Image: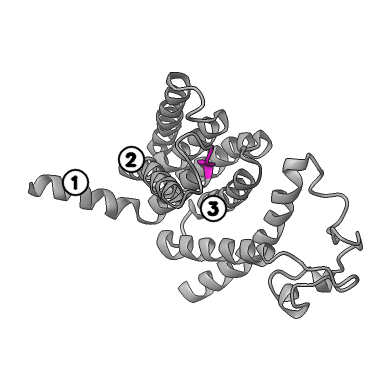
């Protein structure tokens, strides 16, 4: 069963990653993700179905448009492979349970928001706001199937806790935290709170840890300074993903270390 689930997750991840490439490119430009169909940005030729197979088409075409031979960015297959890896990791960590669709959605939307934040330094409401509704619906369904209504209540408390924490940071120190980060924090709090308070704490902490380490490395390499605007969304998402797949053991290790001391 695990092999079948992993294979399906990998194929689904590649397909979803292909669609995420469309979101990442078009949403910041306020373009429809449906029309027009996928086309080459260089010659505007519509991409045929045979040239639109995730990862495989890019490899067969050797990263070039069939019509004009313009180079196709390697980021397209990279996004597909990343989404594939995240989906597989989620299945291996969470198993095939009622809440799996919710966390696969979180992984997908996290990829889209992370790359958009890196590109344009903002987290579009058109992706963030629907994630509240989708998350509530999917997690609510999982709580009903598992006969655990308390999980959904904890998820809502997680939303308020993490979202409120980021809201306070944004108000107390304007500019240090963007409002897009505040809105994303609520989404992440919803998903992490569903799993438990340990996962919520781990996800929040790791987001700041990852962001701080990368910021420090950039400053040491003279790639940034103390007032540089470094997109924080990707670090929030990475911290949340690690918390989903390994938050419980990490929280246990920390509390155990405190107990031993």
User: Which of the labelled discs sits on residue 210, or is there none?
Assistant: none
Q: Is residue 61 above or below residue 212?
A: below
Q: Nearer the viewer, residue 208 or 107?
A: 208
Mark 2 or mark 1: whose residue is earlier in sequence: 2
The overriding secondary structure of the stretch rendered in magenta is loop
Left or right, 255 with respect to 195, comes to left
Mark 3 or mark 2: whose residue is earlier in sequence: 3
Q: Which residue extends farthest top?
A: 172
Q: CA distance from mark 1 to mark 3?
A: 27 Å
Q: Regarding mark 2 in the picture, which secondary structure is present there?
A: helix
| Image quadrant assignment for residue 200 | top left
Mark 1 or mark 3: whose residue is earlier in sequence: 3
Region of the chain picked out in magenta, as a range: 229-233
Residue 255 location, x and y as percent? 19, 46
User: Which of the labelled discs sits on residue 255, or is there none?
Assistant: 1
The residue carrying mark 3 is 107
Q: Residue at x 46, y 49 (%)?
A: 218
Left or right, 99 with respect to 47, comes to left
Q: Nearer the viewer, residue 245 or 94?
A: 245
Residue 123 location, x and y as percent? 61, 38
Residue 216 included in the magenta stretch of the image: no
Q: CA distance from mark 2 to mark 1?
A: 12 Å
Pointer 2 local density, CA inside 10 Å: few below 14, some 14–19, many at least 20: some
Left or right, 3 with respect to 151, comes to right
Q: Nearer the viewer, residue 152 or 91?
A: 91
């Amino acid at each position: 069963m695990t092999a079948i689930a992993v294979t399906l997750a990998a194929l689904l991840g590649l397909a979803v990653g292909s669609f995420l490439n469309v979101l990442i490119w078009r949403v910041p430009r306020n373009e429809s993700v449906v029309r027009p169909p996928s086309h080459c940005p260089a010659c505007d030729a519509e991409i045929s179905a045979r040239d639109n197979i995730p990862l495989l088409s890019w490899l067969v075409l050797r990263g070039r448009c069939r019509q004009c031979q313009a180079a196709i960015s390697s980021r397209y297959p990279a996004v597909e492979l990343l989404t594939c890896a995240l989906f597989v990791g989620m299945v291996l960590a969470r198993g095939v349970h009622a809440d799996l669709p919710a966390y696969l959605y979180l992984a997908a939307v996290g990829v889209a928001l992370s790359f958009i934040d890196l590109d344009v330094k903002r987290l579009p409401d058109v992706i963030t706001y629907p994630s509240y509704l989708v998350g509530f619906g999917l997690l609510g369904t999982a709580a009903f199937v598992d006969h655990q209504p308390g999980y959904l209540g904890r998820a809502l408390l997680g939303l308020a806790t993490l979202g409120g924490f980021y809201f306070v940071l944004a108000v107390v120190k304007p500019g240090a935290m963007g409002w897009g980060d505040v809105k994303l924090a609520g989404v992440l709090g919803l998903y992490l709170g569903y799993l438990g308070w340990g996962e919520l704490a781990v996800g929040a902490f790791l987001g700041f840890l990852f962001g701080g380490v990368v910021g420090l490395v950039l400053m040491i390499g003279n790639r940034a300074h103390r007032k540089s605007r470094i997109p924080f969304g990707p670090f929030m998402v990475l911290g949340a993903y690690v918390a989903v797949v390994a938050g419980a053991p990490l929280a246990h290790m920390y509390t155990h270390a405190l107990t031993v001391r």
